[in-house]
Image (cartoon, helix red, strand yellow):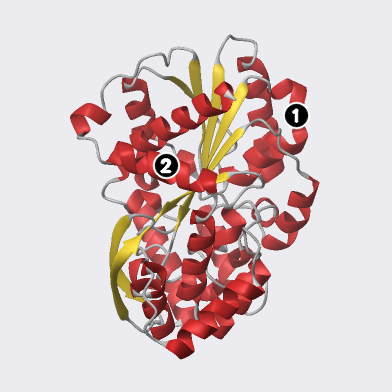
Amino acid sequence: MGFMLRTWLLLLLLGLQYGCVSYAKFPVDAQLLEEPIKTTVDSESAQYYLNHYLQGERLDKHLDLQIDTIYRLYPAALPSREELKQIADQFSNDFAALFLVDKLWQGQQNRQVQKAFHHYMAMSEKELFRVSESVENYLVLWVPGWNYERNGHITGSDFAAPRRLINNLGIESELILVPSNGSVEQSADVIAGVVLRQSKRDKKIIIVGASAAGPAIHYTLGKLLQHTQLNSVVAWVNLGGILQGSPLIDYFQKWPQKLMLKMVLALYDWENEEIMSMSARYSRERIKTLELPPDMVVINYLGLSLTGSLSSLSEYKYPLIAVEGPNDGLTPLVDIIAPGSMTLVATQSDHYFGEDPDINKKTIAIVKTVLEMIGRQLAN
């Protein structure tokens, strides 16, 4: 059965399960992370928060007091999933997403990585795409996403376009051939073998993975390999990785939606055991055992995922896990963020970065940002 037919059947099943969900649409037109954002949000409080409060304008004493109280109640640099859900329950998911982004922006390293990315995005394509100097010592290892062998050329999970772009910059790269529909642990075994083989060369290794590749990379770097075996790995770029699993998987383990999952498994020839390794229940326990090397540069690429900017691939999935708080259509936003990392926010994207019309330019900007952050780390 063709990919598009499978996809439409999956979306139909999701649509039949949840129905057509529409969110309130309050327009916003403001600056966020020093760039313009124009979309809609799901509540008046989120609208006021972005259009006024985050711009330094205090126009509503009652709402200002409520927001001030939120900052006092949740002073941590990075709010937890539970805290963001509490904020979402009081205000809305979009408000909680914006609160998370403001907290991230207050971190010095996060501001540095966001500003560096803006610097490269402001360049002309001719300047940005120019072959980079002093990159011959770097090697990018790409870890593809779920089902990449069958559908990667359509979904972008095989990283074909980014690999071409990076190679044109003069950076050597390799696609790690993990099992296309394997478990987190199965993929991690393959990643570990490639890292050990490539570590014998005189190269600085950057590992890049998206979505389902995220937990496999995290498991490899945080547990499967010893820190002494990772001296050549200088950076991990986590593109929307479901590091603590996807509650969507747990949702479809319950009846009656489990019947729908069985239909999808049959359509795609997937195994439930492999999928369960990416569930929130298992992943949230697994992540407690992982510890990354302290000197490794880790950068998350996080889609802000406001309800007014959801892609066609997220609009059916987002409401199924909305009870968890702000999410990107597959996992809670804060669960994408690796421990001890920097986070780069894509203000008008969600989990499906391939839907972004500027993704090619952003790919190069991300790589050059990562190289800059590595240079700063090595200089310290």
Residue 330 in sight in this render: no
Residue occupying image coordinates x 41% and y 13%: 134
Look at mark 1 in the image and give the residue it sits on. 225
Who is closer to the viewer here, 154 or 39? 39
Q: How far apart, in angstroms, are the residues tagged by discs 2 and 1?
A: 28 Å
Q: Residues within 10 Å of mark 2 (few under 14, many from 20)?
A: some
Residue occupying image coordinates x 42% and y 78%: 46
Side of 167 where 125 appears, left or right: left
Side of 123 where 18 appears, left or right: right
Q: Is residue 72 above or below residue 279?
A: below
Side of 186 where 307 appears, left or right: left
The dot on residue 152 is 2
Q: Is residue 320 above or below residue 346?
A: below
Q: Which label lies toward us, 2 or 1?
A: 1
Residue type (three-letter) at the residue carrying disc 1? Leu
Helix, strand or loop status at disc 1? loop
Name the quadrant of the C terminus.
Answer: top right
Q: Is residue 292 above or below residue 347?
A: above
Q: Position of residue 321 (x, y in %)?
A: 56, 72
Who is closer to the viewer here, 319 or 169? 169
Q: Position of residue 96 (x, y in %)?
A: 52, 72
